Protein backbone atom coordinates (compact mmCIF):
# COMPACT_ATOMS: atom_id res chain seq x y z
CA UNK A 1 0.00 0.00 0.00
CA UNK A 2 1.28 3.48 -0.71
CA UNK A 3 -0.97 5.46 1.65
CA UNK A 4 1.25 4.77 4.67
CA UNK A 5 -1.07 2.18 6.25
CA UNK A 6 0.27 -1.29 6.82
CA UNK A 7 -1.83 -4.25 5.71
CA UNK A 8 -2.43 -7.04 8.22
CA UNK A 9 -4.06 -10.38 7.42
CA UNK A 10 -5.43 -12.33 10.39
CA UNK A 11 -6.17 -16.01 9.85
CA UNK A 12 -9.06 -16.53 12.21
CA UNK A 13 -11.79 -18.82 13.45
CA UNK A 14 -10.91 -18.35 17.13
CA UNK A 15 -11.66 -16.02 20.01
CA UNK A 16 -8.11 -14.69 19.81
CA UNK A 17 -8.52 -13.71 16.15
CA UNK A 18 -11.81 -11.97 16.91
CA UNK A 19 -10.35 -10.16 19.92
CA UNK A 20 -7.40 -8.95 17.84
CA UNK A 21 -9.68 -7.84 15.01
CA UNK A 22 -11.82 -5.87 17.47
CA UNK A 23 -8.74 -4.31 19.06
CA UNK A 24 -7.40 -3.21 15.66
CA UNK A 25 -10.70 -1.98 14.20
CA UNK A 26 -10.62 1.75 13.67
CA UNK A 27 -6.82 1.99 13.64
CA UNK A 28 -5.92 4.47 10.93
CA UNK A 29 -2.33 3.27 10.63
CA UNK A 30 -3.35 -0.30 9.83
CA UNK A 31 -5.59 -1.90 7.27
CA UNK A 32 -6.82 -5.19 8.72
CA UNK A 33 -8.51 -8.13 7.00
CA UNK A 34 -9.86 -11.15 8.88
CA UNK A 35 -9.94 -14.48 7.04
CA UNK A 36 -12.33 -17.30 7.94
CA UNK A 37 -12.41 -20.79 6.49
CA UNK A 38 -16.19 -20.74 6.13
CA UNK A 39 -16.96 -23.72 8.36
CA UNK A 40 -19.74 -21.98 10.26
CA UNK A 41 -22.81 -20.77 8.41
CA UNK A 42 -23.36 -17.65 10.52
CA UNK A 43 -19.97 -16.63 11.90
CA UNK A 44 -19.89 -13.85 14.45
CA UNK A 45 -19.04 -10.72 12.46
CA UNK A 46 -16.19 -8.51 13.59
CA UNK A 47 -15.78 -4.80 12.76
CA UNK A 48 -13.05 -5.31 10.13
CA UNK A 49 -13.30 -6.42 6.50
CA UNK A 50 -13.72 -10.19 6.44
CA UNK A 51 -13.05 -12.64 3.63
CA UNK A 52 -14.36 -16.22 3.75
CA UNK A 53 -13.04 -19.43 2.17
CA UNK A 54 -9.75 -21.22 1.47
CA UNK A 55 -6.93 -19.67 -0.53
CA UNK A 56 -6.03 -22.76 -2.54
CA UNK A 57 -3.16 -24.14 -0.49
CA UNK A 58 0.23 -22.63 0.26
CA UNK A 59 0.75 -21.16 -3.19
CA UNK A 60 -2.75 -19.67 -3.21
CA UNK A 61 -2.12 -17.99 0.13
CA UNK A 62 1.30 -16.71 -1.00
CA UNK A 63 -0.28 -15.29 -4.17
CA UNK A 64 -3.04 -13.62 -2.13
CA UNK A 65 -0.51 -12.06 0.28
CA UNK A 66 1.47 -10.59 -2.63
CA UNK A 67 -1.50 -9.52 -4.74
CA UNK A 68 -3.17 -7.70 -1.84
CA UNK A 69 0.07 -6.16 -0.60
CA UNK A 70 -0.05 -7.52 2.94
CA UNK A 71 2.83 -6.52 5.22
CA UNK A 72 2.14 -8.88 8.10
CA UNK A 73 0.37 -12.23 8.56
CA UNK A 74 -1.04 -13.29 11.90
CA UNK A 75 -1.90 -16.96 12.24
CA UNK A 76 -4.58 -16.91 14.93
CA UNK A 77 -6.16 -20.22 13.92
CA UNK A 78 -7.27 -22.98 16.26
CA UNK A 79 -4.62 -25.29 17.79
CA UNK A 80 -6.12 -28.23 15.84
CA UNK A 81 -6.13 -26.41 12.48
CA UNK A 82 -2.73 -27.79 11.47
CA UNK A 83 -2.92 -27.49 7.70
CA UNK A 84 -3.60 -23.76 7.52
CA UNK A 85 -0.79 -23.06 10.03
CA UNK A 86 1.66 -25.04 7.98
CA UNK A 87 0.44 -23.28 4.80
CA UNK A 88 0.81 -19.92 6.58
CA UNK A 89 4.42 -20.61 7.55
CA UNK A 90 5.41 -21.60 4.03
CA UNK A 91 3.34 -18.90 2.28
CA UNK A 92 4.76 -16.13 4.50
CA UNK A 93 8.28 -17.28 3.60
CA UNK A 94 7.42 -17.45 -0.10
CA UNK A 95 5.80 -14.01 -0.10
CA UNK A 96 8.43 -12.41 2.15
CA UNK A 97 5.77 -11.40 4.68
CA UNK A 98 6.52 -11.34 8.39
CA UNK A 99 4.50 -13.96 10.32
CA UNK A 100 3.40 -14.11 13.93
CA UNK A 101 1.35 -17.01 15.34
CA UNK A 102 -0.96 -16.78 18.32
CA UNK A 103 -0.50 -20.13 20.08
CA UNK A 104 -2.89 -20.50 22.95
CA UNK A 105 -1.30 -22.57 25.78
CA UNK A 106 -2.58 -26.14 26.11
CA UNK A 107 -4.42 -27.31 29.23
CA UNK A 108 -2.44 -29.39 31.72
CA UNK A 109 -3.98 -31.94 34.03
CA UNK A 110 -4.63 -30.65 37.55
CA UNK A 111 -4.90 -32.75 40.73
CA UNK A 112 -8.13 -34.73 40.56
CA UNK A 113 -8.25 -34.82 36.77
CA UNK A 114 -8.74 -38.32 35.31
CA UNK A 115 -7.28 -37.90 31.85
CA UNK A 116 -6.33 -40.46 29.26
CA UNK A 117 -4.28 -38.59 26.67
CA UNK A 118 -4.36 -39.84 23.09
CA UNK A 119 -2.70 -38.67 19.88
CA UNK A 120 -5.65 -38.85 17.48
CA UNK A 121 -9.42 -38.87 17.37
CA UNK A 122 -9.28 -42.52 16.21
CA UNK A 123 -7.33 -43.34 19.37
CA UNK A 124 -9.99 -41.51 21.39
CA UNK A 125 -12.64 -43.82 19.89
CA UNK A 126 -10.60 -46.86 20.94
CA UNK A 127 -10.01 -45.39 24.42
CA UNK A 128 -13.75 -45.51 25.14
CA UNK A 129 -13.44 -49.30 25.33
CA UNK A 130 -15.79 -52.08 24.26
CA UNK A 131 -18.49 -51.67 26.93
CA UNK A 132 -21.34 -49.21 26.30
CA UNK A 133 -20.84 -45.85 27.97
CA UNK A 134 -22.59 -42.50 28.07
CA UNK A 135 -20.22 -40.17 26.28
CA UNK A 136 -20.09 -36.36 26.14
CA UNK A 137 -18.43 -35.69 22.78
CA UNK A 138 -16.97 -32.20 22.39
CA UNK A 139 -14.44 -32.49 19.57
CA UNK A 140 -16.41 -30.52 16.99
CA UNK A 141 -18.29 -31.56 13.90
CA UNK A 142 -15.56 -32.34 11.37
CA UNK A 143 -14.17 -35.43 13.08
CA UNK A 144 -17.26 -36.62 14.97
CA UNK A 145 -17.89 -39.29 12.31
CA UNK A 146 -14.95 -41.33 13.63
CA UNK A 147 -17.14 -42.37 16.58
CA UNK A 148 -19.49 -44.24 14.24
CA UNK A 149 -16.89 -47.02 14.62
CA UNK A 150 -18.07 -47.42 18.24
CA UNK A 151 -21.89 -47.51 17.98
CA UNK A 152 -22.29 -49.33 21.30
CA UNK A 153 -21.95 -46.03 23.19
CA UNK A 154 -24.63 -43.38 23.72
CA UNK A 155 -23.36 -39.97 22.59
CA UNK A 156 -24.23 -36.43 23.62
CA UNK A 157 -22.42 -34.60 20.81
CA UNK A 158 -22.09 -30.83 21.06
CA UNK A 159 -21.26 -28.84 17.93
CA UNK A 160 -21.71 -25.28 16.69
CA UNK A 161 -23.16 -26.35 13.36
CA UNK A 162 -25.79 -29.11 13.03
CA UNK A 163 -24.25 -32.60 12.98
CA UNK A 164 -26.72 -33.79 10.37
CA UNK A 165 -26.07 -37.45 9.62
CA UNK A 166 -22.32 -37.23 10.28
CA UNK A 167 -22.51 -39.51 13.32
CA UNK A 168 -24.77 -42.44 12.39
CA UNK A 169 -25.12 -44.23 15.74
CA UNK A 170 -28.29 -45.57 17.39
CA UNK A 171 -28.05 -43.45 20.54
CA UNK A 172 -27.27 -39.84 19.72
CA UNK A 173 -28.31 -36.60 21.38
CA UNK A 174 -27.14 -33.70 19.23
CA UNK A 175 -26.59 -30.43 21.05
CA UNK A 176 -26.03 -27.28 18.98
CA UNK A 177 -24.39 -24.55 21.02
CA UNK A 178 -21.58 -22.07 20.78
CA UNK A 179 -19.36 -21.40 23.83
CA UNK A 180 -18.28 -20.07 26.20
CA UNK A 181 -19.57 -22.69 28.65
CA UNK A 182 -19.05 -22.32 32.39
CA UNK A 183 -18.28 -25.15 34.81
CA UNK A 184 -21.69 -24.96 36.52
CA UNK A 185 -23.72 -25.43 33.35
CA UNK A 186 -21.35 -28.16 32.15
CA UNK A 187 -21.73 -30.00 35.46
CA UNK A 188 -25.52 -29.70 35.18
CA UNK A 189 -25.43 -31.19 31.66
CA UNK A 190 -23.13 -34.02 32.78
CA UNK A 191 -25.40 -34.85 35.72
CA UNK A 192 -28.69 -34.59 33.80
CA UNK A 193 -27.47 -36.78 30.95
CA UNK A 194 -25.74 -39.23 33.28
CA UNK A 195 -22.49 -38.76 31.37
CA UNK A 196 -19.81 -41.32 32.23
CA UNK A 197 -16.91 -40.04 30.13
CA UNK A 198 -15.94 -36.84 28.31
CA UNK A 199 -14.03 -36.66 25.01
CA UNK A 200 -12.24 -33.38 24.38
CA UNK A 201 -9.52 -31.89 22.24
CA UNK A 202 -6.80 -30.11 24.19
CA UNK A 203 -7.93 -26.78 22.79
CA UNK A 204 -6.73 -24.70 25.72
CA UNK A 205 -8.24 -21.34 26.67
CA UNK A 206 -10.96 -20.35 29.09
CA UNK A 207 -14.03 -20.48 26.83
CA UNK A 208 -14.36 -24.28 26.87
CA UNK A 209 -12.49 -25.11 30.08
CA UNK A 210 -15.77 -25.41 32.02
CA UNK A 211 -16.26 -29.04 30.96
CA UNK A 212 -12.76 -29.95 32.19
CA UNK A 213 -13.38 -28.32 35.57
CA UNK A 214 -16.82 -29.96 35.79
CA UNK A 215 -15.40 -33.40 34.94
CA UNK A 216 -12.79 -32.97 37.68
CA UNK A 217 -15.41 -31.92 40.23
CA UNK A 218 -17.64 -34.89 39.36
CA UNK A 219 -14.74 -37.40 39.01
CA UNK A 220 -15.68 -38.04 35.36
CA UNK A 221 -12.84 -39.46 33.22
CA UNK A 222 -11.69 -37.46 30.21
CA UNK A 223 -10.23 -38.75 26.94
CA UNK A 224 -8.03 -35.83 25.91
CA UNK A 225 -6.83 -35.60 22.31
CA UNK A 226 -3.34 -34.08 22.14
CA UNK A 227 -2.61 -31.25 19.75
CA UNK A 228 -1.12 -31.81 16.33
CA UNK A 229 2.32 -30.35 15.68
CA UNK A 230 2.43 -26.85 14.27
CA UNK A 231 5.37 -25.19 12.55
CA UNK A 232 8.00 -23.54 14.71
CA UNK A 233 7.45 -19.84 13.97
CA UNK A 234 7.58 -16.68 16.12
CA UNK A 235 4.57 -16.86 18.39
CA UNK A 236 2.79 -15.28 21.33
CA UNK A 237 0.17 -16.69 23.70
CA UNK A 238 -2.70 -14.28 23.21
CA UNK A 239 -4.22 -11.40 21.30
CA UNK A 240 -2.89 -8.75 23.70
CA UNK A 241 0.69 -9.85 23.03
CA UNK A 242 0.03 -9.91 19.28
CA UNK A 243 -1.18 -6.33 19.58
CA UNK A 244 2.03 -5.35 21.40
CA UNK A 245 4.06 -7.11 18.70
CA UNK A 246 2.28 -5.12 16.00
CA UNK A 247 2.72 -1.87 17.89
CA UNK A 248 6.39 -2.47 18.66
CA UNK A 249 6.83 -3.41 15.06
CA UNK A 250 4.88 -0.36 13.85
CA UNK A 251 7.04 1.86 16.03
CA UNK A 252 10.21 0.23 14.71
CA UNK A 253 8.97 0.67 11.14
CA UNK A 254 8.10 4.35 11.62
CA UNK A 255 11.48 4.94 13.30
CA UNK A 256 13.15 3.36 10.31
CA UNK A 257 11.13 5.50 7.90
CA UNK A 258 12.06 8.64 9.88
CA UNK A 259 15.79 7.95 9.56
N1 LIG B 1 -10.02 -27.84 13.93
C1 LIG B 1 -10.70 -27.39 14.99
O1 LIG B 1 -10.90 -28.12 15.98
C2 LIG B 1 -11.22 -26.00 15.01
C3 LIG B 1 -11.91 -25.55 16.14
C4 LIG B 1 -12.39 -24.24 16.18
C5 LIG B 1 -12.17 -23.39 15.11
N2 LIG B 1 -11.48 -23.86 14.03
C6 LIG B 1 -11.26 -22.91 12.91
O2 LIG B 1 -11.89 -23.46 11.78
C7 LIG B 1 -11.10 -23.25 10.63
C8 LIG B 1 -10.94 -24.56 9.89
O3 LIG B 1 -10.31 -25.50 10.74
P1 LIG B 1 -9.66 -26.82 10.14
O4 LIG B 1 -9.23 -27.67 11.28
O5 LIG B 1 -10.55 -27.37 9.08
O6 LIG B 1 -8.38 -26.19 9.43
P2 LIG B 1 -7.22 -26.89 8.59
O7 LIG B 1 -7.47 -28.34 8.47
O8 LIG B 1 -5.92 -26.44 9.14
O9 LIG B 1 -7.40 -26.16 7.19
C9 LIG B 1 -8.01 -26.79 6.08
C10 LIG B 1 -8.14 -25.76 4.98
O10 LIG B 1 -9.15 -24.81 5.30
C11 LIG B 1 -8.77 -23.52 4.83
N3 LIG B 1 -8.65 -22.62 5.99
C12 LIG B 1 -8.46 -22.95 7.29
N4 LIG B 1 -8.47 -21.87 8.06
C13 LIG B 1 -8.67 -20.80 7.25
C14 LIG B 1 -8.81 -19.42 7.45
N5 LIG B 1 -8.76 -18.88 8.69
N6 LIG B 1 -9.03 -18.63 6.37
C15 LIG B 1 -9.10 -19.16 5.11
N7 LIG B 1 -9.00 -20.47 4.86
C16 LIG B 1 -8.79 -21.29 5.91
C17 LIG B 1 -7.46 -23.70 4.08
O11 LIG B 1 -7.82 -23.98 2.74
P3 LIG B 1 -6.84 -23.66 1.52
O12 LIG B 1 -5.75 -24.68 1.60
O13 LIG B 1 -7.71 -23.78 0.32
O14 LIG B 1 -6.31 -22.26 1.73
C18 LIG B 1 -6.88 -24.94 4.75
O15 LIG B 1 -5.95 -25.63 3.97
C19 LIG B 1 -9.77 -22.66 11.07
O16 LIG B 1 -9.73 -21.33 10.64
C20 LIG B 1 -9.78 -22.76 12.58
O17 LIG B 1 -9.22 -21.62 13.19
C21 LIG B 1 -11.01 -25.13 13.95
Image (tube, helix red, strand yellow):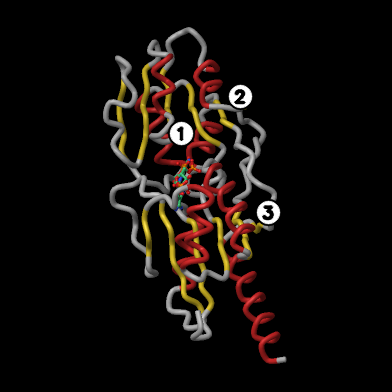
Residue 58 versus residue 113 in the image, above or below: below
Judge by depth and name the residue closer to the eye, 143 or 153: 143
Residue located 51% across and 71% down the image: 69
Label annotation for residue 233: 3
Q: Secondary structure at mark 3?
A: loop
Find the residue positioned furthest to the top: 131
Element carrying mark 2: strand
**Residue 144 horizontal side relative to residue 228, left or right:** left
Left or right? Give the position of 127 relative to 257. left
Question: Residue 89 or 109: which is nearer the viewer?
Answer: 89
The answer for how far apart the CA atoms under marks 3 and 1 are is: 26 Å
- Number of other residues with Cα within 10 Å of mark 2, as a class: few under 14, some 14 to 19, many 20 or more: some
Question: As displayed, is residue 105 above or below residue 19?
Answer: above
| Residues at marks 1 and 2 touching, judged by CB atoms closer than 8 Å | no
Q: Earlier in the sequence, mark 1 or mark 2?
A: 2
* Residue occupying the point 35% across, 28% down: 192
Q: Which of the two discs, 3 and 2, labels the residue nearer the N terminus?
A: 2
Name the residue at 40% across, 14% down.
153
Badge 1 marks a residue whose secondary structure is loop
In the picture of the structure, the residue carrying the numbered disc 1 is: 139
Q: Position of residue 41 (x, y in %)?
A: 29, 48
Return the mark for residue 170. Answer: none
Badge number at residue 116: 2
Residue at the location (40% across, 34% down)? 142
Amino acid sequence: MNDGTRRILILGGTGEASALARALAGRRDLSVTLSLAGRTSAPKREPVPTRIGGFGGTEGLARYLCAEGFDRLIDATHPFAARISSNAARAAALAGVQLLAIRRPAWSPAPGDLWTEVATVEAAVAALGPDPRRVFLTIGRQEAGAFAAAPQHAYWARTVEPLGDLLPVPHLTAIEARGPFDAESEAALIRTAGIEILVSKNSGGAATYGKIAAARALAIPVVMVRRPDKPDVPSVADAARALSWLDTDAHAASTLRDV
